[in-house]
Amino acid sequence: MDYSTWSPVYHAILGDFGFPEAADVTARDELAARTDPFDLDRLGFLAGATVAIAGAAPSLAGELDIAREADAVVAASTAADVLREAGIAVDLMVTDIDKNPETIRTLTREGTPVAVHAHGDNIPAIRAEVPTFVREHVLPTTQAAPVAPVENFGGFTDGDRAAFLADHFGAGALTFLGWDFDDPAVDPMKAKKLDWAERLLYWLERRRGEQFTILDGRREAIDTSDIPR
């Protein structure tokens, strides 16, 4: 995914939520000031692999075999904690630092890469938490236009960004655990984000020529008006 392809969808998301792009740009620049270029060759293990994309929905604990059977595991946010507690190694964590910065500290101390994301709502966390992570293991990302050393592989929520990242680095197949697009426990803002995550995964599966089982029975109802053909 290059930014020229991602940009129209990103701006549709901004318009839908009423988010200011300037805030994302500020967050990106704050992250850039606190990180170094990440050695992207370290993610070569994703190429050709079956990659489990672990979301943090309550269903995660009952679906751990999907991660155990995969070649690599990319965990969104607190899914990393559930997986590690179950004895499942996390190969890459994707997070916007909103829930478990201690896990990021632990993983980066252990040498596990963490894709740390900047957006307009997490500038205080970037300033306070990013300097406490081991810099060489932080992959800085943005949803706005990328500037060195901050990358943009596409995606909006932690979960769908994990899928877009795995795709960017050549994953052979994507499997999913811990996803619930209809979680009744989330607030309206989170529900709207899940709606966009679903749309983005539909776009991704079309780009890959693959069908994700978590979208089975749902595709016909997905709003594709802002998704490129």
Image (cartoon, grey):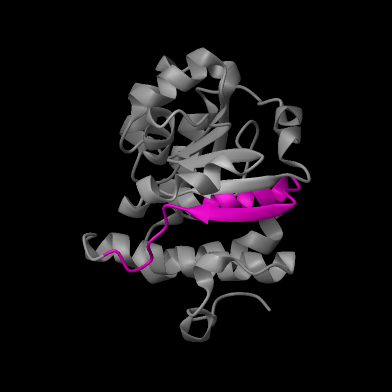
What residue do we see at 68% from left, 79% from top?
229
What residue do we see at 56% from left, 67% from top?
213
Position of residue 174 measured from the top left corner of the image (x, y, whole percent):
63, 54
What residue do we see at 64% from left, 69% from top?
211
Q: In this view, does 39 lie above or below 174?
A: above
Q: Is residue 218 magenta?
A: no
Query: In terms of depth relative to the viewer, which is nearer, 224 or 125?
Result: 224
Q: Is residue 205 left or right of residue 224?
A: right
Position of residue 220 measured from the top left corner of the image (x, y, whole percent):
52, 86
Query: In terms of depth relative to the viewer, which is nearer, 169 or 90?
Result: 90
Q: In which quarter of the image is residue 136?
A: top right
Q: Let me know if residue 142 appears in the view.
A: no
Q: Does the magenta stretch include residue 162?
A: yes
What residue do we see at 59% from left, 54% from top?
175
Q: Is residue 100 left or right of residue 117?
A: left
Q: Quick one: quadrant of the N terminus?
A: bottom right
Q: Is residue 44 above or below residue 36?
A: below
Q: Let me know if residue 8 appears in the view.
A: yes
Q: In which quarter of the image is residue 74?
A: top right
Query: In terms of depth relative to the viewer, which is nearer, 115 or 14?
Result: 115
Q: Is residue 223 above or below residue 74?
A: below
Position of residue 28 measured from the top left corner of the image (x, y, whole percent):
50, 39
Q: Is residue 205 left or right of residue 88?
A: right
Q: Is residue 56 left or right of residue 187?
A: right
- The region drawn magenta spans 160-183
Position of residue 169 measured from the top left corner of the image (x, y, whole percent):
73, 44
